Image (cartoon, coloured by chain):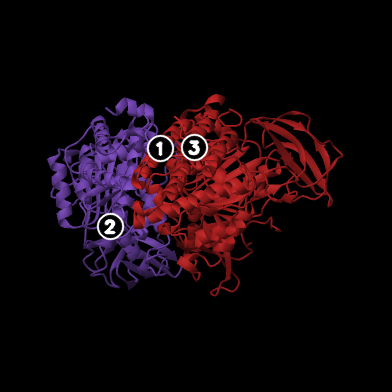
Chain colours: A purple, B red
Amino acid sequence: MLRKEINKISEVGKALISVEGNPGVALNHVVELLEAGTNQSLSFAKAINITEDFTRFQVFNGTQGLSTQTKIRMHEIPLTAGFSYNMLGRSFDGVGNVADNGPEIIFEKQVSTRLDTLNPTVRLVPKQPLWTGIPMIDVFNTLVKSQKIPIFAGPTEPYNRLLSQIAQGAQADVIIFAGIGLKFDEYHYFKEQLSQSGNIDKTIMFSHLAGDSQIKGLMLPDVALSVAREFADQGKDVLVLLTDMTNWSNILRNVANYQDQIPSLQGYPGSLYSELAKRYEVAADIEGAGSITIIGATTLESLEDPVPDNTGYITEGQFFLENGKLKLARSLSRLKQQVNGNTRSDHRPIMTAMASLLADAEKAYEAAEVGAANDAFSQKLLRYRTDFITNMEEPFGESVELEAALDKCWDILKRHFEPTETGLSKKLIDQYWK
Amino acid sequence: MNYNNKKRTGSLISIQDSLVKARFYDNVIMGETAEISVEGKSLQAEVLQIDPDHKNTDAGIVEMQVFEDLTGAQIGDMVEFTGKPLSVLLGPGLLTSIWDGLQNPLYKLGEQDAYLIPGMRAPALDEEKLWEFTPSVKAGDVVKGGAAIGSVPEGRLEHKILVPFNLGKCKVESIIEKSSVNITETVAVLTDAQQIKHKLKLAFRWAVKSPIPFKERAIPSKTISTGVRVIDFLAPVSYGGTVGNPGPFGAGKTVLQHSLCKYALADIIIMAACGERAGEAVEVFKDFAELDDPSTGDSLMNRMCIFGNTSSMPVAAREASVFIALTVGEYYRYQGYNVVLLADSTSRWAQALRERSGRQGDIPGPEAFPMDIPDQIKGMYQRAGADKGTGGSLTFIGTVSPAGGNFQEPVTQASMDATGGFWGLSQDRADAKKYPAIDPLAYTTSVYDSFVSWTDRNKMLQTLMEANGIDQTISTIGLKKVPVDKYVLYQKGQTIDFCVMQQDAFHKLDACTRPDRLKVINEAVQKLIDSSIEFSRDGLEDEELKELVKTKFDELRQWWKDWNSSAQSEEEIAGLSKHIDQFILQED
């Protein structure tokens, strides 16, 4: 079929181009940009704003080298992603092109990247724990299949190491790695880790490196999540690793800025919440099919920044990494209540008791800084705090089974407190305080 | 509004995200809905603004927001104006329903596809189901808008079949005998003063932005038992009242909403899941269906209906979902029922307005919200209220999700201004896992004497405040410099906080406290506050005495916490008072 072609590009900006009038393209449909004369394909682009006076496109490969002579060829379909089981073990760019030296892939089908909302009635209430062997997660913030949860961390924290450690232990049929704005060493690290753990054959990597075209980074989560969703629709349990969603949000901010949108907070568009939610909400346990679990990374300077702030309202909790430790106070798994009532009888109470004591200990720690923690109990709390940080908040190390981790909790309490000081019920004390 | 019956159309001239412009030649009515044909599907839209067409003086330009994804839309796509504003279908079958933000039933849509595909529709209420209609008027009677012409049983409720509220005095021309009918069949014919005939069915449509009137509006006066102690003691809410419930993420808004859903004593609970996580709404309609209604013992779902416009659904429908939920609430209020509407979250609703006004190019107000956002929020809360005329009420509890947890932001501020009650959730309390994290020192209420007297409540509050002050002193100058009597007061406050204000929402017994039990707790608390406890000094130094005080209070707290989660028989419940007496006298 001969596709319609036009050449009346009137405006070339940083990631966007406009053409005069309306060439008959539909919203979100894809066009191909061709070099004048040679007809060599330069890039694809997506129609994002259509009026009778002009039509505006996002250019996947960036706009460097485009001119008003560049030709536009219509494709008359929205962006799709290729899907095939042969993708396992392979690497792709943000719009699904092969990005390694492997053989060409013949796709079984093309899947829509529109990320239609899953009908809530076909969602199952998540009830299956995903054990990680990390006590701070398993005891205090149990991860649940189909959960969406980011790691919040400063830019220099080992968040990718933690992400990869969780991924290696997690039970999943397929792992989809979606990296946006990665530094090359981060990309390399994940590839190494996944290879070493023997998971590479069930992994598909979608990667966008810092400096690659912004639009490809912007599209990447949609392409990766659409492929993940197809696996889940076919009954697979899929784990998606999204790192780093702050990079993604910053691209979103840039592109909104190129479009002259009115910014809301710190330059981000007012739609930041909805845009993040659209991606994270793909996580689901689907009735009669598989599941998608999303673990993300969100780098931040401050929790009040718009990206972590909006993310926190969308995701089902967050793991907070600070000074290499998984901090109890700011971490939360919203789904833990679905699973931690069916484990050992002391699981929930000891989790609450230790958290409450740690909060008191933090207060004592602040008081100690001004020399006001001189009473005996404050001293107990301070020793408890040190013990807790060293033995409970350390995420890297030997994998610990849940029961052993709970026993470890009792050991810590016994080292520092009298039974009544813990706020635990007499029944539990009688059973476990030995 | 005067609607034209002639078919009116337009064609698209601009498309961006969910906002479109169309050229029209006939007439367009502000606020009416339209159907846009995109790739053979029909998408629903609402008129936002009408402008002149500078290119074509015979035409006008209409700006619309579209409630569904517009992928595939092109210049020239046809728009058909419906002449009708956005409306909701009111009638039997509302209860137990689960809809999207535009009243499409989600289970019915699920039969078509696992995903919500733009253009998918299904009738809002079951059109096949038969209802046992019993007439309450006869031919020749005169009725007017809001009057009941009969009723059908809906679960345990008597669902009155009302004359649409906009009709004036009408004569009943005919009405059917007691029989089983579905919602599409005519049950009565009325003739109005202009001799126009109106066919009444069990259900009718009502514009969501036109509040259903009160029969006789009254000040809310009766307190709702929510089962949540910190609310019922310190910040109670009345039937017909309004509450804003702000909190940073992770402070426990969702768990609190779920508690209210389960335990608040009301005839009907409506949940507007507006721009929040889908999983939370699913938990409500899948897990709560297994739970019992606290007042009837029925399945909890039988008193509920849910509008689920969750965060990944089209933003434009978010605004609609809250208005639709409010209208359903007003409808049941008019029938004389006590309705509690939980809107989670009003911030997402306000953000939808912000996204829209940004696209429309409006000059932004603070934090880019529309300038009139405080008025819009006030207008929304004002639709709640008590109706003396019908005996019904609509209580509106809206969560607020302030950006950065900052209560100074525009939506939180406007909500404080608009509501009669304010439950502020605190990050510090949540970090310390002190749930519910409603800060006992950061809330307001417009309800005075309720389950406990205003005096008792204030004494409780005073103790908490003083204990909080002493806590600050201990943190800054250390425990050593705090006198023993102040330390005892501090321990009293800590005990009230730990054993009364904090509550385990996941514990079968502790999760819900009713007024009879509140009374027992209040007596214990008042005794504890009023007493001077006789710790025997026995030549102890101050420091040693303080340690003794702490140990004794630790024991008391452990005992009381156990009581919270175990005392059930009358004798066990009465045990609290005895235990406090012994504690005050320091008897074993």
Classify mark 2: helix, strand or loop. Answer: helix
A9 in relation to B422, above or below: below
Q: Earlier in the sequence, mark 3 or mark 1?
A: 1
Classify mark 1: helix, strand or loop. Answer: helix
Side (left or right) of B419 relative to B470: right
B72 in relation to A253, above or below: above
* Placement of the C terminus of chain B among the 4 image quadrants: top left
Q: Quadrant of residue B530?
A: top right
Measured Cα–Cα span from mark 2 to mark 3 = 36 Å
Chain ID at mark 3? B
Q: Looking at the image, which is closer to me, B414 or A139?
A: A139
In this figure, which residue is indicated by the disc labeled 3? Answer: B584
Q: Which amino acid type is shown beneath numbered disc 3? A: Ile
Residue projecting furthest to the right: B140
Classify mark 3: helix, strand or loop. Answer: helix
Side (left or right) of B489 relative to B131: left
In this figure, which residue is indicated by the disc labeled 2? Answer: A369
In this figure, which residue is indicated by the disc labeled 1? Answer: B552
Nearest to viewer (mark 2 / mark 1): 1
B448 in relation to B25, above or below: above
Question: Label 3 near label 2: C-beta < 8 Å?
Answer: no
Location of residue B149 in the rendering, given as x and y in whole percent from the top left corner: 77, 38
